[in-house]
Image (cartoon, rainbow, N blue to C red):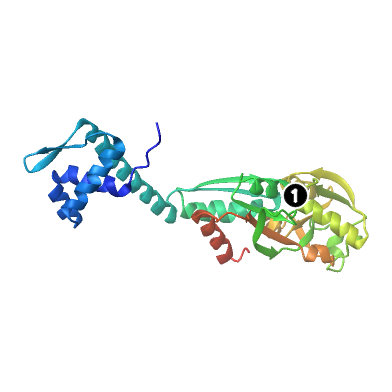
Amino acid sequence: MQRIGLSERRLHYFLAVAETGSIRGAADHLNVEASVVSRQIHQLESELGVQLLQRHGRGVIPTEAAELVINHCRERRSSETLLLTQISELQGLERGEIHIVAGEGFREELVRWVLQDFCQQHPRLKVTLEFANAVDTVRMLANDQAHLGLAYRPPIDPAVRTVMQRKQPMCVIAWPGHPLTRKKQPLALSDVCPYPVGMMSNGFGLSNLVKLAQYHDRVQFESSLVTNSIATLKSYVKAQLGVTFLSSHAVADEVADGSLVALRTRSEVFETAEAHVLVRADRQPSVAVERLLQMLEEKALF
């Protein structure tokens, strides 16, 4: 059987007749001629191949088939009302979902600004926060597995675009009293070479920056720890096992409580390092994602 595309106009006219009980009543309600309504009903009956209305005195009564159409019309109207309500809720951020994927270096800021601030303002939104290296962050965005990404030095992918970026210099992270804290700042990267270094695993934006800095400044660090966890790098430095490289934002709490220090360098690569906020290139961000981007911008995070 060939699929029938029912006319919205004919269904609308039919429901008006069913609810008013007459062709004339529907015509008055719709502010059209009765002949227009009658013609639309006949065309609908022809499309469906059944009789929908039976004349009864000055009015009409629906047939058994008409009851099915009436139910369909009312369900459709109810569904449209629900759709409009849901759209309105999305606009007001009463529902929706944001999947964020980010490098480990953004953990502190995302917890502070997204979970503590944005989520408290919009408690009915579902936020998924996942941490990955820069390569996987871009891959997940390109494959529509995430809505928003944050990364240092992300790989180029035509399916992904940067919507915000900020300068976020990399620092040498040491414990108070480390010999580097007594050297004149900003440090040369060669000053770090005599000491053991904790490094992020391959694929992370931080690891890529360190490799580029070593190549650019012609130095080689002695790594005694390689990990995919910034929390582990912080513990490594606090235990006075070596130094590492992170942004001052990533250790803001530890610098504030005096357990770590962030030392600027003369490295052009470290000083010009940038953090990127990424989205899928050919997708319009949802209302929720747009609002989160606006909040990040207002708070001067990007």
- Residue 53, horizontal then vertical, whole percent: 18, 38
Q: Quadrant of residue 62?
A: top left
The number of numbered discs placed on residues in the rendered structure image is 1
Q: Name the residue rendered at 76%, 59% in the picture.
A: 261
Q: Is residue 59 visible?
A: yes
Q: Nearer the viewer, residue 162 or 300?
A: 162
Q: Nearer the viewer, residue 22 or 83?
A: 22
Q: Is residue 290 above or below residue 68?
A: below
Q: Is residue 242 left or right of residue 246?
A: right
Crowding near pointer 1: few (<14 within 10 Å), some, many (20+)? Answer: many
Residue picked out by circle 1: 234
Query: Element at badge 1?
Result: helix
- Residue 299, horizontal then vertical, whole percent: 57, 65
Q: Is residue 264 left or right of residue 95?
A: right
- Residue 103, horizontal then vertical, whole percent: 69, 50
Q: Name the residue rendered at 79%, 46% in the picture.
A: 236
Q: Name the residue rendered at 79%, 50% in the picture.
A: 237
Q: Is residue 245 above or below residue 145?
A: below
Amino acid of disc 1: Lys
In the rendered image, which quarter contains the C terminus? bottom right
In the rendered image, which quarter contains the N terminus? top left
Q: Is residue 21 left or right of residue 248?
A: left
